[in-house]
Image: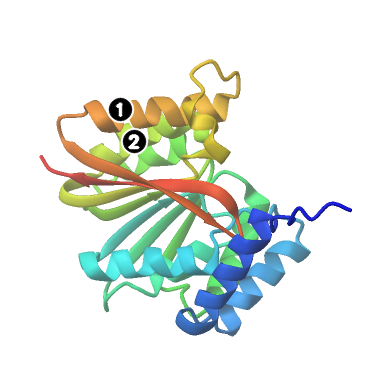
Amino acid sequence: MSTETRRPDPQQTWTAVDGYFNGLLVEEDAALLAAVATSEAAGLPPHQVAPNQGKLLSLLARVHGARRILEIGTLGGYSTIWLARALPEGGRLVTLEADERCADVATRNLERAGLAGVVEVRTGPALETLPQLEAEGAEPFDLVFIDADKPSNPAYLEWALRLTRPGSLIIGDNVVRDGAVTDERSTDPRVQGVRRFTELLGAHPRLTATAVQTVGEKGYDGFVLALVTG
């Protein structure tokens, strides 16, 4: 009889560890829980950030003192709630969502959370709504969270730079892709979009950036954090 010890499933371990820390450090109130439940009931994909990642976004916004936040990719509004709650009095968040169904769900979730007066949901492809923000003469954003279609990440980065100022933060989610980001021959447009996005971050004279790999209930992925320096 084999005495080989079976190793635990890494995903089960990652999920359990997330559960442990979330239980002690991250409190999801009724509005956040309802945002997830409502999104699931509406058939939206379960692509929202994990609770600990949502709180990380909130902490980054608070530490940075962000008064104006731009989110590219709303989904059901879960990360939007985390970010909007980090704003000081008088702060504002604009979130862009291409899918009308997602935007409708997010709008209801934000209203339930009492954030309708703080958050503006704009519906339509971000590469159409971003130029509108510029044309309106919007004040520079202090923080930009990019979490939308990955092939467009390079274009989103260029727009983020046009809509920010020195000292602004740019955060890009889902950049590791289960490690596929290292495959230069990948035919996946999401991987190639992330690779080009990262190359632009590294080469841009107005940015200094780093990337962090993550594991948890959402699997193996990671994010980039960039500071606008000039």
Residue 156 rendering spot, x and y as whole percentages: 39, 36
- Near-viewer residue (190 or 116): 190
The residue under label 1 is which amino acid type? Leu
Q: Which residue is disc 2 drawn over?
A: 157
Specify which label sits upstream in the sequence, 1 or 2.
Answer: 2
* Few, some or many residues within 10 Å of mark 2 (<14, 14–19, 20+): many
Toward the top, the furthest residue is 185
Residue ID at (69%, 52%): 45
Image vertical order of residue 45 relative to residue 83, above or below: above
Image vertical order of residue 71 relative to residue 37, above or below: above
Toward the right, the furthest residue is 1
Residue 63 rendering spot, x and y as whole percentages: 23, 69
Residue ID at (57%, 79%): 31
> Is 5 displayed left or right of 165 in the figure?
right
Image vertical order of residue 27 relative to residue 98, above or below: below
- Tags 1 and 2 touching, CB below 8 Å: yes
Q: How many marks?
A: 2
Image quadrant of residue 40? Answer: bottom right
Residue 230 rendering spot, x and y as whole percentages: 10, 39
SS label for mark 1: helix
> Is 34 displayed left or right of 199 in the figure?
right
Residue ID at (24%, 64%): 66
Residue ID at (43%, 41%): 129
> Is 41 displayed left or right of 82 in the figure?
right
Q: Which residue is disc 1 drawn over?
A: 200
The residue under label 2 is which amino acid type? Leu
> Is 11 displayed left or right of 64 in the figure?
right
